[in-house]
Image (cartoon, rainbow, N blue to C red):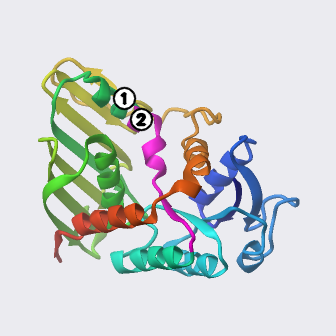
Amino acid sequence: MRLAIAARNETGRSYFRAVQKKQKDVLPAGVFPPVEEELSFSSYESLLNAEADAIMVCAPPEDQSRMIRLALEAGHNVLAPWPVAADASEALSFMETAEAKGLKLMPCNVERYYGNVRDVKQHIEQGTIGQIGMVEMNRTELSTSALQLLLLDVDTLFYWLGDAVQAYGYRRTSDDHSDGAADLAALTLSLECGALACICAYRGGKESQGRAYELSGSGGNICFDSRNAISCVVHDGQAGPCAFGPLPYLPRDASRDPYALLLRDVARSLSDVDMAKVRAHTARMFELAHSVEIYS
């Protein structure tokens, strides 16, 4: 797959660095804004003329929708970070446009390829801690909306354990950052597998940035906190409190780089992607995330 990348933020630059690792499945076809002379394009419109099998669009929210629309209109398959758009109607509109044109629009959740997330998936499949009964997921960031963070964690949860049968939640927003929660969203889900999951996402606030989760099973716990570990820890009993330390170094070779792993899988499956299934999954994610009731 020859991939052109609109790297308008750090996520886009991470994808470009992954492509530069010269994977056999993914070759660079161009980048904007300019990074290096050989592959750089002076504008996004000129990047749309690149000879590429797909375009990865990574841009700030105020630009991303326009750029995805232009790429589809130009006849390109499009990859974009999950959740693609700020609301369900726009995301589904993009997917319907892609289907009508015989194109693919792939929402990409690179977090599914993080080492700790893949470790959890493996432990669940191996039954390391028995039957999962409870999942808690929490994260705090400074620039991403709580609802978008919630969507990412719901997608990861479903990757681990499957769909939900019920969902309850709330969202509270405030312009007063002194209260410690400028944007908070919480969702409780009853899963088809029998587990109960509680997800909380914050934008702003006084908590240090990071994400943490704990899965409790009949035979122990799986814990992770990005502020003191790069992988999950399995306990044969109740986990003790976490001690936050400096963020450790994370290797970026192609065999571990989540961006490289995601692009490899996309390259191998792009032609076989069922857009109807992608559209249904996207609609389901937004349906759950928007079940939260807003309090001001």
Q: Residue at x 43, y 80 (%)?
A: 93
Residue 122 is labelled as: 1
Residue 118 is labelled as: 2
Where in the figure is residue 202, as x and y percent of width and height? 30, 59
Where in the figure is residue 264, as x and y percent of width and height? 61, 44
Q: Image check: 130 left or right of 11?
A: left
In the figure, residue 43 lies in which quadrant?
A: bottom right
Is residue 182 in view from this perspective?
no
Where in the figure is residue 126, as x and y percent of width and height? 30, 23
Assign the C terminus to one quadrant of the image: bottom left
Where in the figure is residue 91, as x and y percent of width and height? 42, 74
Q: Residue at x 36, y 76 (%)?
A: 87
Q: Image check: 256 left or right of 221?
A: right
Residue 57 sits inside the magenta stretch: no
Q: Amino acid at mark 1?
A: Gln
| C-alpha gap between disc 1 and disc 2 | 6 Å
Element assignment for label 1? helix
Q: Are marks 1 and 2 in contact (CB under 8 Å)?
A: yes
Relative to 212, residue 155 above or below = below
Q: Image check: 106 left or right of 40?
A: left
Relative to 1, residue 31 above or below = below
Residue 106 sits inside the magenta stretch: yes
Nearer-the-camera pick, 254 or 246: 254
| Neighbourhood count class around disc 2 (C-alpha, 10 Å): few under 14, some 14–19, many 20 upward | some
Q: Hey, which residue is sitting farthest top in the picture?
A: 236
Element assignment for label 2? helix
Is residue 94 in view from this perspective?
yes
Q: Residue at x 61, y 59 (%)?
A: 12
In the figure, residue 125 lies in which quadrant?
A: top left
Nearer-the-camera pick, 3 or 258: 3
Magenta residues, start to end: 102-118
